[in-house]
Image: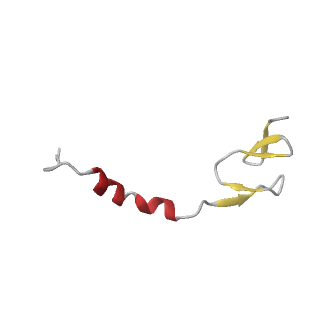
Amino acid sequence: MAHPKRKTSKTRRDKRRTHDGLTSKALSVDATTGEIHVRHQAHVFEGNLYYKGKLVVENFK
């Protein structure tokens, strides 16, 4: 297995990872509620928790 010849500095490592935050979050419209939400995440609509268009928890905070 390959091993690095020298330690990669924290600065160099972090520079390589800076580009991930530039893209915007993928948004989707819920078919049941019509609410715009972040994809693959549950969202609250009128006090209820929905995921993939289905009611998961009623009377959620």
Give the side of residue 46 with respect to residue 7, left or right.
right
* The C terminus lies in quadrant: top right
Task: Place residue 48 in its image quadrant.
Answer: top right
Residue 25 x, y percent position in the rendering: 60, 59
Image vertical order of residue 43 relative to residue 60, above or below = below
Query: So how many labels did they put on this image?
Result: 0
Q: Residue at x 30, y 50 (%)?
A: 10
Image vertical order of residue 35 relative to residue 58, above or below = below
Q: Residue at x 65, y 54 (%)?
A: 39
* The N terminus lies in quadrant: top left
Residue 34 x, y percent position in the rendering: 82, 57
Q: Residue at x 46, y 59 (%)?
A: 20
Give the side of residue 53 with respect to residue 39, left or right.
right
Give the side of residue 55 with respect to residue 7, left or right.
right
Residue 44 x, y percent position in the rendering: 78, 45
- For the rendered model, the colour scheme is secondary structure
Residue 40 x, y percent position in the rendering: 64, 49
Q: Residue at x 84, y 41 (%)?
A: 47
| Residue most extreme to the front | 11
